[in-house]
Image: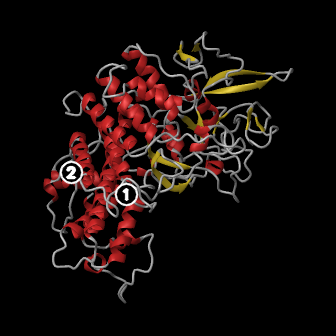
Amino acid sequence: MKKTIKIFAVGLLVAGGFSSCANLDMDDDGRLTMDDIFSRYDRTQQYLNGILNDMPKVTLSYGATSTPMLAGFSDEAQDANDGQGNHVMSNWYNGAGSAADYASFPLTAKTINCWEHYYEAIYKANMFLENMLNPSDKTFPFDETMKTGWIAQVRVARAYQYLMLAKRYGGVPIVDGLRDVNHDYSGDRRASFEEVADYIISECDLALSTPDVEGGFTWITTNSVNLTRFVAWAIKSQTALYAASPLFNNGSSKYTWAVAADITKQALDECLAHGARLYDKTPEASSALNVYDQYFLTKAEATRGNDPETILQSTTQLKIWQYCGTPMNGKMKEAGACPSQELVDCYDMKNGQEAILGYSDDQHLQPIINQSSGYDDNDPYKNRDPRFEASIYYNGCQRNLNSPSSILYTYEGSNCALSTNVTDVRFTRTGYYMRKFNSYTSDDSHAADGYMPLFRLAELYLNFAEAAYQSSTPDTKFGNMSAVDAVNAVRARVGMAGFPTGMNKSDFERRYRKERRVELAFEDHRYYDVRRWKILEQTDGFVTGMQATKNSDGSFSYKRFKLADRRCNTPRYYFYPIVQEEVSKMLQQTGDNWQNPNW
């Protein structure tokens, strides 16, 4: 961090705020002072846009084989690159990551260090706020309402960057102002997660305390880059949920489950009161399988007219067809994150009953079948939750919705057969391919895949459900809603029967965690959920898959199999390591070892 901040302090990276902008009308020598930037409306807005453009992209690294989906780093999936020598996925499964090699960790790349990346974004936000809040003798040609709205958005953006840091590293240093080259680093320290949570929530509260007036910090915007009040509430909700979770709360934090329930309920109520609702548009039969499928193929608009659920969406269109594709896709490169059998087992039957209750063996090869559910081990994909077929390609499913003969098969010798050669990354490692976000019409000449939601209303429902049942009982009402009510609202969107009332906390927790896993599959939640619940050792030691065999009569039989053990489920993997170079510098400066445990 010292290196990063000192670079920023001498102004060498000022232009970083304009990486996506043009026409800055710079001086002849190509340099701009801060006075040059913040004394002109157009340049200030370009700097602001640079800050806001950081937000919808920083958690996503899709589009290159060296930066695979986060799902493969969890028990949601096994990445098809698991046998590729020094590939990041092979290293991850083999436990080969080190504090000296930041490229071995999720959502990073050989040239991206998450620690520096987020602090760069924070620095840009600090620079903006310093110049807008303390203009000195500079003349600011800005409308006061607009200026206040810009300040609020940057506070929310900075809060988001801290949330991204804290999810990965735990407590981190809070740098809320500019530092000069003579800054004394000996007094710096890592804040606790509770202190970071306080800071994040207070920044959002400051933003929300500004008036909701046109041209300021509003609920609805016409500019897709701008942040809204919805985003501030969503950040508060997720921050409170994490702060109450076992990984970050040993029983002494003020962020109890009751506090988290109150914050998440207020966030949910505010969003609902201002027009948010679960996406419910029934698609044409030729465009999507069901409403859930259609939602993830929809690009949200700033005005929220076509999508009232999404709170913040990545501006980068996914290329699932290419990097998590099937061999039926021309010019696809790899199968990518192949869904695990454990994830498949989480999907209920359409009648609302659980299909698989657990496993009778420690290898997950002997499922405990709910005999009253209607699940058939010889036809395991029949009559499952509609979100299953919208999320996962499986043996015998129709891929092209306009062509009944376009059937995907995974049995030996078929068009999408289970991989028998780990050097060929185009074929599934588990017997499944990812369907979520993928349009069957997508290829190298037609981009029709979806966009990753960073926050959406369904998450807020589930955040509230978790905090509410943990703080009381599944049926306890917080105002007009209980944990059961919140989960059932999410299930009702796809026509799934709700959870019954009267469940004890243990039974509800088991079903809630499956529901969260199903609804938010492949959306970068599971990786963090198993860590904040402190169950990583139980979930991520291995995953299983399903081998389909075609019988002589044309029917299929199915056999579960276990993939190789992973070595990425030990306590050290609860947090990212801080890059060792930075740790060494701060040890010299402060006398404290900032490194995370076991690294």
- Picture quarter containing residue 493? top right
Image quarter (top left, top right, bottom left or bottom right) of the C terminus: top left
Mark drawn on residue 587: 2
Along the line of sight, which residue is nearer the eye, 568 or 24? Answer: 24
Looking at the image, is 22 positioned above or below residue 473?
A: below
- Return the residue at label 1: 117
Q: Given the image, on which type of amino acid does mark 2 rest?
A: Leu
Question: Quick one: SS at disc 2?
Answer: helix
Residue 431 can be seen in this image: yes
> What percent of the width, then of the height, locates residue 456?
45, 43
Q: Residues within 10 Å of mark 2 (few under 14, many from 20)?
A: some
Between discs 2 and 1, the one toward the N terminus: 1
> What percent of the width, then of the height, locates residue 275?
42, 45
The nearer-to-camera label among 2 and 1 is 1
Residue 579 can be seen in this image: no
Which residue is pictured at 57% across the width and 52% down the height?
Answer: 318
Q: Is residue 483 left or right of residue 278?
A: left
Looking at the image, is 42 positioned above or below residue 61?
A: below
Q: Given the image, on which type of amino acid does mark 1 rest?
A: His
